[in-house]
Amino acid sequence: MRKVDKTTRLLRRLRSKIVVAIMVSSGIVIMVAMASVLALTYRTNYQDIGDALEKACTLGPDETVLYSVGRSAGKSAVDRPERSGGPYMPTAVFLVDDDGDVVASNEDFVTMDDTVRDAAIKAALASSNAEGHIADASVFYKRVAVTGGYVVAFADTTTFDATITRAATLLALASALFLAALLVVSEIIARLVTRPVQHAWEQQANFIADASHELKTPLTVLIANNEIMLAHPEFTAQERATWLEGSRVEAEHMRGLIEDMLTLARDEATSPADQLGAMASVDLSALVERASLAFDAVAFERGVTVREDVAEGVTVRGDEQALERMTKTLVDNAVKYAGEGGSVLVRLTADRRDHPVLSVHNTGAPIAPDDLAHVFDRFWRSDAARSRESSGGYGLGLAIAKSIAERHGARISATSTEQDGTTFTVAF
C-alpha cells in the first residue's frame, strides 16, 4: 500500500509540473502577445494624433474644424468636415509670443477651457520636448517655433485613453478566459501524458513482484534440498544424487528465468539504430521449417500433429537467432496447449505487398476473451492449466516473442475462439 501511495504522489507531482510548465509558457506567450497588441494599438492611435497635431501646426490658427478639446471643455463637436486624407482629429491651435501670451487661435471653431488652456500652454512651452502628453490637461501637444513665438497645438486624449483602456480590458479578459480553459486542458494533457508513465510503473512493480515470486520457488527448493542433505549425513551417494538432481533442475529454471529477463531488459535498453545495424537478410522459409521440425518429437510424445504450410523463398531483413527464437516460442506454445490428439498448423505466406505473414494455429482450450489482451504481458498465465508446473515456462516467452517482433517492425497478435482454436500471427 505504501508503494502505491508513493507512486500516486510521484504521478501527481509529475502532472503538476507538466501543468505548471504549460501554464507558465502559455502565460509568457500571452503576455508577449498582449504587450504587442497594446503597443501596436498605442502606436497606431498615437501616430494618428501626431499626424493631426503636425497638420494643425502646419495650418496654424486658421484651422476651421469645429471641435471641443481638453478636459472641462465647454462645447461639443457639432461638425466633422471631410478634407483630403480623411476626417481631422479635434485640435486646438494657438499662436503665442515669446512671453506665452496668446496672439491668435482657432477658438471660434475649437473650444478649450481657459484655465486648462493657460496651464497647457505654459506646460508645453516649459517642456524640453517639442511634443508630448500633458496629463493634468488630458491633452497631447506639439510645439513649433515661428518668428516671434510659437505655434502650439493640442489634441484631446479622451478617445485615445478610452481606446487603450478598452483594448487592455478586452485583452485581459480574453487572456483570463483562455488561461482558465487552458488550465482544464492542461490537466487533461497531463493525465494523458503521464498515463504511459503510470502504466510503465505499474508494469515494473508487477514485473519485480512476479520475478521475485518466480525466483522464490526454486530458491526455496534449493535451500530445502541442501538443508535435508546437511541434516542427514548418513545418506548414500545415490540418495544425495537424487537431491542434487532436484537442485540442478531448479537451478536450471532459475538460469532460464534470469536469461529471459535479461533478454527483455536488453531489448528495451538497445536503441532501434543498434538493433537495425545487427540485422541481415534471413531466409524465413527455411527458418520456419527448421523451427517447426524441432518440435516433432515433443509433439509426438503429447499426441499432437504438427503440419507446415510454408511458402518458398520468403525472406526478411532481421536477426536470424532472434527470429528463430520467436518462431520456436510460438510453436512450443501451440504444441503445449493443443491438447492430446490436437493439431498445430505453422503457416508462412506473403501478403499482396510481399510482406511475410507467419501464423501458428493450435486446437485445444481457447484463451478467455478477458485474458486475450494480456497474453503478451510478462509472467502472464491465463489459468492454472498454464502454470509453470504444467508448461515448464515462466510466462516470459510470449513477451519475448512480442519484443522480437516489434524489434523487426512486425505486428504480433492473437485470436482465440472455441470454434476456430487459437492463432498467433506475426505480420512483417
Image: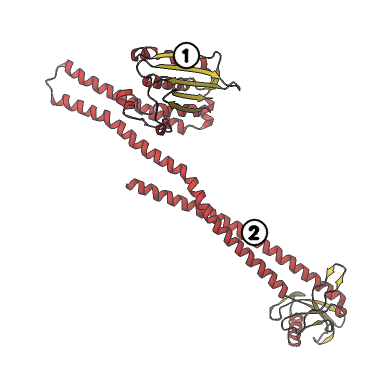
- Amino acid under label 1? Glu
Dividing the picture into quadrants, the one containing residue 121 is bottom right
Dividing the picture into quadrants, the one containing residue 335 is top left
Residue 43: percent from left, percent from top: 73, 65
Residue 125: percent from left, percent from top: 77, 81
Residue 254: percent from left, percent from top: 31, 27
Q: State the mark number for residue 416.
A: none
- Amino acid under label 2? Ala
Q: In the picture shown, does residue 169 fall above or below 320? A: below
Which badge, 1 or 2, comes first in the chain's sequence? 2
Q: Is residue 144 left or right of residue 274?
A: right
Determine contact: label 1, label 2, CB under 8 Å. Answer: no
Q: Residue furthest front?
A: 419
Q: Is residue 42 left or right of residue 54?
A: left
Q: State the mark number for residue 33.
A: 2
Q: Which residue is mark 1?
A: 308
Q: In the picture shown, does residue 153 fall above or below 278? A: below
Q: Nearer the viewer, residue 76 or 27?
A: 76
Total marks placed:
2
Residue 201: percent from left, percent from top: 41, 41
Q: In the picture shown, does residue 180 fall above or below 277? A: below
